Amino acid sequence: MSNTLWNLIIITLIGYYAQIIYHEWSRPIVLTKNGWIRGLRSEEGYDMYLGIPYATVREDNPFSTSSSYPSWNGIFDASDNTKLCPHVEEALKVPVGTLQCLNLHIYAPRNGKSLPVIVFIYGGQYRFGHAGRIGSYVVYIPEFFVQNNVIVVTFNYRSGVYGFLCLDTPEIPGNQGLKDQTLALQWIKKNIENFGGDSNRITILGHSSGAMSTEFHVYVNPDLFNQFILQSGSAFVPGGIGKADRNKPIKIAKTLGYETTTLNDAIKFLTKVDVQAVATATKAMIFRPCIEKRFAGVKGFLNEHPLNMKLDLGNKTVLIGNTKREYAKEICLPYNAIDSKDVVKINLNFGFEPNDNIVERIKKYYDIHEKEGQVEYENVLKFFSDLYFNYPTDRTINKYLGSGVKKIYQYIFSYSGNRNLMKVMRNISVEATTHGDDLGYLFKMTCLDKTSDSDQLLVDRMVKMWTDFAKYGDPTPKISNLLPVTWVPTTKQRKYLIIDTIMRMDDTLLHDRIKFWHNLYKTYEKFVKLES
């Protein structure tokens, strides 16, 4: 081999390894209270720290409370966002996850200082959801936020049987997923300044059950954040808080082929079973937060219902709202094609003790009557949306107005476009803006590949309002061509912003329907269930 060829090979190798060394040493590095962390530089110009462990799950009892992650030696490589908590992924319909999944991801503008922070808590009915990547599939990419000079933190927490199994025992008292969230919020509060964030300007953004979780933290952990956003979720939703069920592990074990009548045996068995098998066996089961029984030496999360808890918002500012037709994603059928004659009675069981008078009163108000074995789609949609979203949100606002809140900004999202997330994921053809559709205008997502000019305008508007809220506590501090309307805080008159192609303020939000539910709860107060 000639000297010239050898020289070319050597030069090529030197160049190759020089690129590797440069890439490695150009990665951002941060010192936290746990140790050094090395992240990644994104092609879009911001820094990413992926998969930072904030807590650890007990291998001998994965259904119990997690504990803070210990410090480490050396440099932690924060470049992996594929470790998810066990669940069956909603869109892909496949089981995913591992036990040691409690990690968080930080997305920060390069060289930022004292920046506001948005912490996102995803939803998923307390059964599914994640803040990571499955192959090339990613849902919550906060690129739009970061481009507006805000730090974003997302994190995984346990859902389903691992996060919300409630047994009224010291070992498994319940609300493990909410306690995971608490540890994540504590980690962020202690460390975010090292990433260029301001620990005194933390905004929690929760969606669906993530919004419900956020509201629980308002009562339990108010010192860990400064303001919050509740999208399509309230702690006052009927059936939002469940009861302990000591038979559930026995039922799950039986589903997996293990017969026992003893709770401890069932738990021991489930502890040894592959977590994805357990997730698959429990994917259709209901899991919710619960009111925990008090035990000596065990720190609870919820020891009473928020309706009965005193609240001091400490001058916090709130942004809260729903989509126009929240429940359309659950009953996305052709009109006049819902076949349940007990649709009202079955769903009222979550919020009320059985009472035929309540059922008939609701049927009459919403005109829900069988017609050839079917009931009207539109009327049932209004009933569901009011029962699970619109009225609970109104109850939340009422409580906040009397609890020292600084300002409340209320909205209704009614825009329909190519980035309406649930309409795309579920192929919903009915003209409706439904639960989860607004997320497509806040996050970059691999499943949304079409964006029209009007879609992009909505993205720009929503991200600007949400990030200005995080920065200033005001989503529209200045009128502009992009945001030509001042978002006026809500009052007892319920002023709210309609988010659509044409933005405008209104004060007539479902007035008669909300009044109906207010009177119904007042009249039948003794039949209301706080747990179900």
Image (spheres, rainbow, N blue to C red):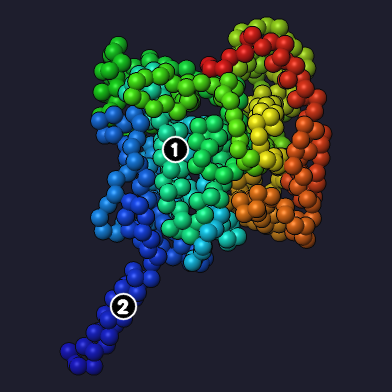
Q: Amino acid at mark 2?
A: Ala
Query: Residue 323: where, in percent of width, then height?
Result: 68, 38
Query: Residue 382: where, in percent of width, then height?
Result: 72, 27
Q: Amino acid at mark 1?
A: Thr
In this rendering, position of residue 349 left or right of residue 486: left
> Toward which corner of the image does residue 4 lie, by quadrant?
bottom left
Task: Say which residue label 1 marks.
Answer: 182
Q: Which-is-in-front pick, marks 1 and 2?
A: 1
Please tell me whether residue 348 is drawn above or below residue 10 in the rendered image: above
Q: In front here: 207 or 429?
A: 207
Task: Say which residue label 2 marks.
Answer: 18
Q: Disc 1 or 2, which lies upstream in sequence?
A: 2
Please tell me whether residue 430 is drawn above or below residue 195 in the rendered image: above
In this rendering, position of residue 196 left or right of residue 361: left
Residue at (54, 58) in percent of width and height: 115
Query: Residue 436: where, in percent of width, then height?
Result: 61, 40
Residue 353 visible within the image: yes
- Please tell me how crowded label 1 is: few (under 14), some (14-19), or many (20+) other residues with Cα within 10 Å: some
Please tell me whether residue 134 is drawn above or below residue 232 in the rendered image: below
- Please tell me how crowded label 2 is: few (under 14), some (14-19), or many (20+) other residues with Cα within 10 Å: few
Residue at (57, 44) in percent of width and height: 226
Query: Residue 17: where, in percent of width, then height?
Result: 28, 76
> Toward which corner of the image does residue 435 lie, by quadrant?
top right
Quadrant housing the N terminus: bottom left
In this rendering, position of residue 327 left or right of residue 118: right
Residue at (62, 54) in percent of width and height: 471
